[in-house]
Image (spheres, rainbow, N blue to C red):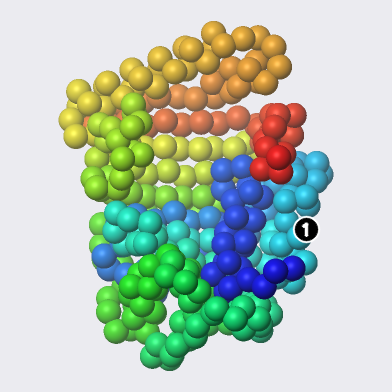
Amino acid sequence: MKAKTISSAVILVTLAVFMAVPASAGPIPSSLVPEGARWIVHLDMEKFVGTSLYGYLEKEDAFRIKSRDIDRWLKMDIARDVKSLTVFGLGPGDNDIVFAVSGKLDKAGIVAMVEADKDHQAAAYGAYTLYSSGSDEHSAFVNDSLIVFSEGREAIEKVLDTAGGKVKNFAGTVLSASLKEVPAGAFLSGTLPDLSGLGKELGQSKVLDQASGLFFLAQEKAGSLHIRLQVTAASDESAKNMANVVQGFMALARMGGDEGDMARVAGLIDGLKVQQDGKVLRLDFERPSKEIADLISHSRGFSGFLD
């Protein structure tokens, strides 16, 4: 295998987790999230692996193909060794995004891969060692079971300063408070209290272009997958407009066809409820986990990543 930097190793873990779960996160490492963090997404892998949805997909070998090379390179069982993946943004740019992976990490093996790359650099940063390769790969182990990665060196330094107690973490902020709505059983959660300035991609969405805040979660209860997306609009009228857009998409999906994957997707629409309460628009989705697993297994789903 071509030698990889420590950053590349983190990317591999991150991609493996995202490819291993259809929409998928141990607890959030709050002590390293800076006070100025603007948004956060957390995936609790332990909780996800404990769901029946994971069990159905594992029987179909949905994860084995995806992670077998990564497992070998990093000496990890992605589904069992990765405890959580937390992604948060410290600003509007890609350089402000930080990935934090916790779990049973082969620190010695990952560092050995770094040292095998002749272009790598390592520098002491307080009690930590900051690794880099080029101008857009920066990583550091916070401890033996927690590693952070970012394209921006400044973002990593800010995280390490937070972990070291030099600056405040995000406890007591609006961002932290919004996470209190997340139920204990959720394996996926995310909150973006202020969507302004987060990039053109959000502005291109017919739903989110009128939103000022966003909250979502996923959990499994009694054998069914529950997903909630809650959007806060600038006004009651904006929330109503967003609800109309969603309901229009639902109507189009129902008209999309009655055969193959389109029929399965159309059937899922029955599990979606749209509710508006003033400026808040809430979308709640619930369908049996077996049905979701069958849809993923019988469509391109995971195989699309392998083409």
Q: Position of residue 255 (x, y in %)?
A: 54, 8
Q: Is residue 268 left or right of residue 190?
A: right
Label 1 CA crowd tier, 10 Å (few <14, some 14–19, many 20+)? some
Question: Which residue is rendered at x = 29% and y = 54% of the image?
Answer: 92
Q: Which of the image's four quarters has the C terminus?
A: top right
Q: Is residue 120 visible in the rendered structure shown here?
A: yes
**From the viewer's perspective, is residue 132 above or below residue 70?**
below
Depth check: 286 or 209 in front? Answer: 209
Q: Is residue 260 left or right of residue 87?
A: right
The residue at which mark 1 appears reads as: 68
Q: Position of residue 134 (x, y in %)?
A: 47, 72
Q: Position of residue 176 (x, y in %)?
A: 32, 60
Question: Which residue is rendered at x = 77% and y = 58% of the image?
Answer: 68
The quarter of the displayed image where residue 288 is located: top right
The quarter of the displayed image where residue 77 is located: bottom right
Q: Position of residue 257 (x, y in %)?
A: 61, 9
Identify the amino acid type marked 1. Answer: Arg
Q: Which of the image's four quarters has the N terminus?
A: bottom right
- Looking at the rendered structure, the secondary structure element under dot 1 is helix
**From the viewer's perspective, is residue 222 above or below residue 95?**
above
Q: How many marks?
A: 1
Question: Which residue is rendered at x = 29% and y = 84% of the image?
Answer: 166
Q: Is residue 225 left or right of residue 2?
A: left
The quarter of the displayed image where residue 105 is located: bottom right
Depth check: 229 or 130 in front? Answer: 130
Q: Is residue 47 visible in the rendered structure shown here?
A: no
**Farthest residue toward the front?**
118
**From the viewer's perspective, is residue 173 above or below residue 203?**
below
Question: Which residue is rendered at x = 36% and y = 77% of the image?
Answer: 157
